[in-house]
Image (tube, rainbow, N blue to C red):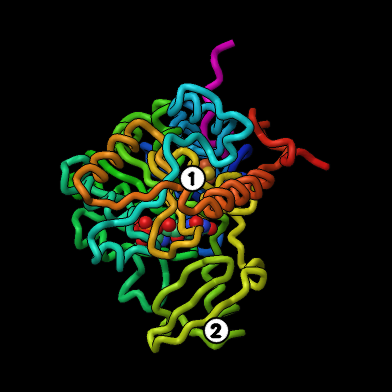
């Protein structure tokens, strides 16, 4: 039998329509024939646009193109495959938050980056450093559309410090940052960093592990954002405005620290219980097992006792080299993770919770915790 060449029809059946698809958009970006589109409104899912293949098949796939399945961080044995590729081994059952070289607290030394950042401004500091040290040409990040008052998160390209500053901070609706890839390439970028939640942060690694061609080679850095879930855009009108009178245009900043924290331009502060927000959970997050952005070079989160520090997991050799260079030249300040044992414990607990979401009917994950099995 000739070897199987899995393509769009396999991805469609096994991931897109089975409930595993996170909407990360990696398949769309990797498709060399531009026959995959992306539904930005509410569904956040890829779809096939080629009339000759139909919604569930692809004529290029029938002729041997496999790039969409090579790019998908939820296709078949993605987790052990990427662990093996990045770290040379499978994770142990104890490594619920993924394989880590260092767990620390870090923040930008530059006060402007720190003020713009969601937590310690570490992600922004990394991007600025990588751009200014000729490591990357561009970063795929998330911006707010237009003047920002609509809080609509859209994929964007940051090419310099000003671009990084303009896109710092967190939005809690989904933003498929990989979709900014085409704009980065059009602007001449060859070495690209991707910032994104775990679903997106695994894409560069899976593409490299499965040899997804030029796109894989261009992603030279993956910065992960820890994430339990994202919300549908309708949460603004249907929850924040309807129940709390908070209109989109009045909101200055949001954060999630056990509750939804909302600051208004007038300086008022509101808390919205997360329990109330659950009804607006984005469908693509409901089967996601990855809280800690387990395949990023460096993963970052905001949990813990110190608001202006970023909980940081340095994972890969590339991440370690970059992080240590920034530490050595004073670009960032670093404290041991032991300064906030509660944050590290919470990261592990939230990772365990997320891992229980991976359906038992899906491809079994070696190393999956017994708690993920049916009762
Ligand atoms: C949707 C979402 C959920 C999160 N959930 C948690 C959580 O449950 N627990 C936790 O500890 N941390 C969570 N985080 C991570 C946290 O909010 C910070 O992003 C992280 O601590 C880095 O902070 P920083 O100051 O170093 O980053 P910054 O310097 O502020 O940089 C943040 C980067 O994230 C990008 N970004 C912002 N919003 C989005 C988005 N919606 N989609 C893709 N990219 C985006 C920005 O463009 C920027 O490049 C979440 C982040 C997001 C975006
Ligand atoms: S998880 Fe990502 S790569 Fe996989 S099918 Fe969904 S959008 Fe495409
Ligand atoms: S929970 Fe976060 S990491 Fe998982 S699919 Fe949703 S946005 Fe992506």
Count residues near mark 1 (Cα–Cα under 10 Å), then give few for <14, some for 14-19, many for 20+.
Answer: many
Front tag of 2 and 1: 1
In primary-sequence order, the first of circles 2 and 1 is: 2
**Residue at 26% in and 62% down:** 113
Judged left or right of residue 108, residue 23 is right
The quarter of the displayed image where residue 94 is located = top right
**Residue at 69% in and 36% down:** 369
Chain part drawn in magenta: 1-11
Q: Position of residue 35 (x, y in %)?
A: 43, 43
Could you tell me what secondary structure mostly forms the magenta stretch?
loop
**Residue where numbered disc 1 is placed:** 293
Name the image quarter holding the N terminus.
Answer: top right
**Residue where numbered disc 2 is placed:** 241
Residue 8 highlighted magenta (yes or no) = yes
Q: Is residue 267 above or below residue 280?
A: below
Determine the secondary structure under disc 1. Answer: loop
Answer whether residue 369 is visible to the viewer in this image: yes
Answer whether residue 142 is visible to the viewer in this image: no
């Amino acid at each position: 039998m000739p070897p199987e060449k899995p393509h769009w029809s396999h991805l469609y059946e096994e991931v897109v329509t089975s409930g595993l698809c996170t909407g990360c958009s990696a398949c769309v970006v990797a498709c060399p024939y531009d026959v995959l589109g992306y539904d930005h409104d509410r569904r956040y899912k890829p779809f096939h646009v080629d009339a000759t293949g139909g919604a569930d098949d692809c004529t290029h796939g029938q002729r041997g193109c496999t790039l969409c399945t090579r790019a998908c961080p939820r296709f078949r044995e993605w987790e052990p495959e990427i662990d093996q590729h990045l770290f040379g081994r499978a994770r142990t059952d104890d490594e619920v938050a993924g394989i880590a070289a260092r767990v620390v607290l870090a923040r930008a030394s530059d006060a402007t980056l720190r003020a713009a950042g969601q937590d310690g401004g570490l992600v922004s500091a990394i991007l600025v450093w990588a751009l200014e040290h000729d490591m990357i040409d561009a970063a795929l990040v998330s911006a707010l559309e237009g003047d920002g008052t609509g809080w609509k998160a859209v994929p964007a390209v940051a090419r310099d410090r000003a671009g990084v500053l303009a896109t710092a901070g967190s939005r809690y609706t989904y933003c498929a940052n990989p979709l900014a890839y085409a704009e980065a390439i059009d602007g001449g970028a060859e070495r690209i960093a991707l910032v994104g939640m775990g679903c997106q942060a695994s894409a560069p690694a899976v593409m490299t592990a499965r040899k997804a061609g030029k796109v894989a080679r261009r992603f030279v850095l993956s910065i992960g954002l820890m994430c339990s879930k994202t919300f549908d855009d309708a949460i603004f009108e249907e929850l924040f405005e309807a129940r709390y009178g908070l209109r989109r245009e009045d909101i200055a900043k949001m954060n999630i620290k056990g509750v939804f924290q909302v600051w208004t331009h007038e300086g008022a502060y509101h808390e919205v219980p997360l329990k109330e927000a659950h009804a607006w959970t984005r469908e693509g997050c409901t089967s996601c097992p990855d809280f800690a952005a387990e395949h990023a070079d460096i993963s970052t989160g905001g949990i813990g006792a110190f608001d202006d520090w970023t909980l940081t997991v340095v994972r890969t050799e590339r991440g370690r080299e970059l992080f240590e260079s920034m530490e050595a030249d004073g670009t960032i300040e670093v404290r041991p993770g032991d300064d906030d044992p509660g944050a590290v414990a919470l990261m592990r607990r939230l990772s365990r919770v997320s891992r229980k979401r991976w359906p038992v009917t899906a491809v079994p994950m070696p190393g999956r915790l017994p708690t993920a099995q049916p009762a």
